[in-house]
Amino acid sequence: MNPITVKDKIYWVGAIDWDVRDFHGYSTNRGTTYNAFLIMDEKITLVDTVKRSMKGDLINRIKEIIDPEKIDYIVVNHVEMDHSGSLAEMVDLIKPEKVICSKMGQQALLQHFHHTDWPYEVVKSGDEICLGKRTLSFLETRMLHWPDSMFTYVKEDKLLFSSDAFGQHLATSERFDDQVDQAVLLEELTKYYANISLPFIRPMSRNCWKR
């Protein structure tokens, strides 16, 4: 499966896990998808990675577009392993100028990977980073559903990388919601929200949406 264009020069380069049947202790009988995105600009940026066992899929999709070693920045929206499991290997391969994350994200990365020498760029809500023609804006979304979570917004394209906010576990070759069975989509969205988001709705409201 090739990279998929989301916007001009912004590509989905993630991985599809057709076989996983348990996640966070509930059934995922339709598998799941790990979303990662590549932004081609003056500063080439990778937004999130994938589960470690599927890093080959990520690397191969990036290679369809560019040599991974030419990537400048890596954005870490969430440190949970379905988002960052292959991060250490990607940092070793890419040697990025910046690993962009929230303050809580940096703490979680240090706890998980123990790399004090990574080129951390810690951002908070409202901070912006210019890539060239595009600008990334950041919003901390603590307790969605971990303290480290954040959103990344591409201002010029009005494109939000929303991490787990609107998630569902669904393995599919399609990337857009209007391309899949709407009944299946609603079922998986509801199941995900009930199991992952709903238990954290009060702390999430306090820590994120009132900012």
Image (tube, grey):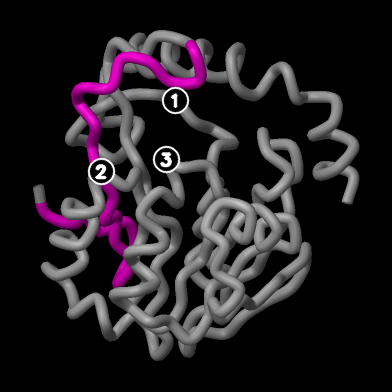
Q: Residue 196's spot in the image, x, y percent?
A: 60, 22
Note whether 145 is above or below 27 in the view shown. Answer: below
Residue flagged by tag 2: what amino acid is it? Ser
Above or below 51: residue 134: below
Give the class, few, some or many, for how many residues have Cα within 10 Å of label 1's Cα (few <14, many ≥20). many
> What is the spatial separation of the Cα atoms under label 2 and label 1, in whole angstroms?
20 Å
Residue bearing mark 2: 53
| Residue 123 point in image, percent of width and height | 71, 70
Q: Quadrant of residue 41?
A: bottom left
Between marks 1 and 3, how big is the CA–CA gap? 13 Å
User: Which three-letter amino acid code belongs to the residue tagged 3?
Assistant: Asp
User: What's drawn in magenta, residue-wise?
Assistant: 2-25
Residue at which label 3 appears: 82
Give yes or no for residue 17 being in the magenta stretch.
yes
- Identify the mark nearer the N-term, 1 or 3: 3
Which of discs 2 and 3 lies nearer the camera? The answer is: 2
- Residue depth check, mark 1 versus mark 3: number of the one nearer the observer: 3
Label 2–label 1 contact, CB within 8 A: no
> Measured from the top left, where is residue 178 in percent x and y?
32, 30
Label 3 residue SS: helix
**Counting residues from the N terminus, which is met first, the one under dot 2 or under dot 1?**
2
Q: Is 145 colored magenta in this rendering?
A: no
| Residue 31 % position (x, y) | 28, 21
Residue that mark 1 sits on:
168
In terms of image quadrants, where is residue 19? top left
Say few, some or many: other residues with alpha carbon within 10 Å of mark 2 (under 14 / 14 to 19 / 20 or more). Answer: few
Check disc 1 and give the amino acid type.
Answer: Gln
